[in-house]
Amino acid sequence: QVQLVESGGGLVQPGGSLRLSCAASGYFFKTYGMAWVRQAPGEGLEWISDISNGGGGRYYADSVKGRFTISRDNAKNTLTLQMNDLKREDTAVYYCAKYDHQYEFDYWGQGTQVTVSS
């Protein structure tokens, strides 16, 4: 079965960096686009970035553009999100999500908490 397992969250000071990873299994990873979505306390889900199946297409929300970088390693079935210059408003649970061929989300990870605080 499809599994998505995030890791790498934690507590970081403003201006710091974190690298999130998502280990995918149970399907042909290189066939599907992937995304990162976050949910801040008391807020709804916010799409922040996605990447095409081959990695050539990468897109970002304005809120993270220039600070976050999405990437994937299709040989290792891994999705990553490098987060630099973190701000308090980046505090959220971060989820990796798999797209189906119609670019609708069909599987989600369990999420990893990122807290930006001094």
Image (cartoon, rainbow, N blue to C red):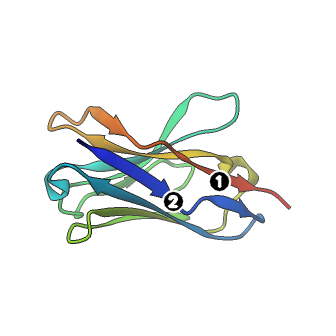
| Horizontal and vertical percent position of residue 57 | 25, 58
> Which quadrant is the N terminus positioned in?
top left
Q: Which mark is residue 114?
A: 1
Quadrant housing residue 39: top right
For the image, the number of numbered tags is 2
Q: Which mark is residue 17?
A: none
Contact, CB < 8 Å: mark 2 with mark 1?
A: no
Is 2 situated above or below 42? below
For this rendering, which residue is in front, 27 or 93? 27
Is 22 situated above or below 4? below
Q: Residue at x 17, y 49 (%)?
A: 27
Disc with the residue nearer the chain's start (2 vs 1): 2
Q: Is residue 99 left or right of residue 69?
A: left
Q: Is residue 56 left or right of residue 63?
A: left
| Horizontal and vertical percent position of residue 44 | 57, 28
Q: Is residue 55 left or right of residue 35?
A: left
> Which quadrant is the C terminus positioned in?
bottom right
Is 108 situated above or below 15? above
Q: Amino acid at mark 1?
A: Val
Q: Residue at x 70, y 34 (%)?
A: 41
